[in-house]
Image (spheres, rainbow, N blue to C red):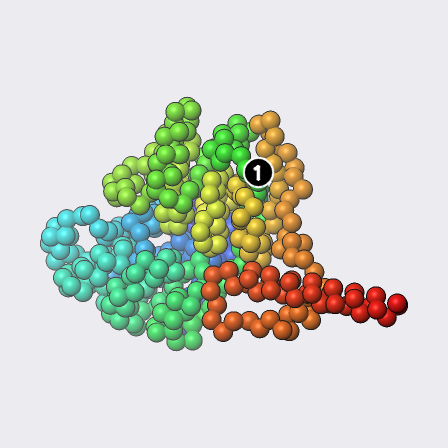
Amino acid sequence: MVFNNLDLKEYIVRALQDLKFKELTPIQLEVFSKYKTNKNILAKSKTGSGKTHSFLLPIFQELDETSNKAFATIIAPTKELAMQIYKMAQHIASFSKDRIDIKLFIGGTDRQKEIEKLKTSTPQIIIGTPGKIKDLAITANALKIYTSQFFIVDEMDMMLSGGYEEELDAIASVLKDSKMMFFSATMEEQVLQFARKYLSNPISIDIQNTNDTKIQHIWIPLKHKDRFTCLLELLSTMQPYFAIIFANRKETVIELARQLTEKGYFVGVMHGDLSARERKRILKDCNTLKYQFLVATDLAARGIDIEGVSHIINYELPYDYEFYLHRSGRTGRMYLDGIVYSFYSEVDDEYLDALAKKKIEPSYFELKNKELIAYKGRATRKQRVKPKTDFQKEAAKYVPKPKKVSPGYKKKRQAQIDELADRLKRNAGKKKKRRYQ
């Protein structure tokens, strides 16, 4: 049968139709059109763009459903993301008349039982976290991944920043003859360095923020008001289907959730100190809408999929610019619109200037009498920087930049320039006065 003019297997088409797919997303089309070449793939695509199906579709399209060997190995940096991929793969497989053996391998399970089961059968599609896959496949030599024709690494940047390079190396060395596909939301140098080791002259795919027009960014000044008071005022203006409220520290998240619960809101909590079982329970509760709000640290910004997130609230701006994008990527997913609200203060000006360079076009609103009202916005860096006078330009020639920089050196140097510029201006004034005496 044909889907997007692609000759996909019938059961894959039925699975896509069940998901209400009308067409494939740009990342799915790009990967599917290029995977049959003899080159590996390095793909950049933001969260929410449909990249999980971009590698699942080629795997199922090429899979021999009657085989009893490992055909694909997929690794993800977190248990939650691995479980999410597993569920999507199981959904596609459920439409096949043949039984497709898909297994999930993550931490917190009975290692010895898994080893015993693997003595009698090998899954066709293997999904798991890097530590667990390395342990079963290499340390225990129980999981026979070496026959895999596909090796997928999802969220590569998150994988490397999490310290899994050693595990990746070990697994990749076994699967060096497989078709490799590395996916990442960013292409930082660490990602490129690792890719160069295993992907010789790969096909590079870069999907530029295809859904940005579906996410509205609203920036709200605090204006020295209490942050929690502003949050309550904002919540009184909206009725989200489901919202995630982000804060930077675990302690802030816990306290914020407590305060919101006391105000009568149905709130879940997600942070790094929760056990895998607790996180799984909270995700289930969020997806069944037991809560209307989830208060979370950046653990939830990557690799955790909650259906129908209509609103994101940055109670605090993240320390890293990239995490603003990752947080935003939790909404506006798969053709659904979303709104991102962010509180900011005067000290955030340079941070927001940097975000603006990432082609984010915010709307400014302020809170007045528990209403959101259009606001004139901030002065940009260009507007804030004073134009240099001719005297300042001349003075700058005589105040060299220090060979070793220290905190605040720019301000100290500018103060010296301003002082010298004032002297030059006064001297020029005296000369002009004498000339006309």
Q: For the point 46% across and 43% down, which residue is it?
A: 316
User: x, y percentage for residue 424?
Assistant: 71, 67
Q: Residue furthest bottom?
A: 200
Residue 65, by quadrant, is: bottom left
Q: For the point 51% across and 44% down, which residue is it?
A: 332
Q: Residue furthest right?
A: 436
User: x, y percentage for residue 242?
Assistant: 45, 35
- The local crowd at label 1, few if under 14, some if 14 to 19, many if 20 or more residues have their Cα within 10 Å, is some
Q: In the drawing, does residue 208 fall left or right of residue 318?
A: right
317 or 113: nearer the viewer: 317
Q: For the point 42% across and 27% down, which residue is it?
A: 265
Q: In the drawing, does residue 382 fall left or right of residue 222?
A: right
Q: In the drawing, does residue 334 fall left or right of residue 95?
A: right
User: x, y percentage for residue 350?
Assistant: 55, 54
111 or 407: nearer the viewer: 407
Q: For the point 36% across and 69% down, which residue is it?
A: 194
Q: Is residue 365 above or below residue 379?
A: above
Q: Is residue 106 above or below residue 263?
A: below
Q: Residue furthest front?
A: 437
330 or 345: nearer the viewer: 345
Amino acid, disc 1: Lys
Q: Is residue 309 above or below residue 429?
A: above
Q: Is residue 402 above or below residue 342?
A: below
The C terminus lies in which quarter of the figure? Answer: bottom right
Q: Mark 1: which secondary structure?
A: loop
For disc 1, the marked residue is 223
- Residue 333 in sight in this render: no
351 or 63: nearer the viewer: 351
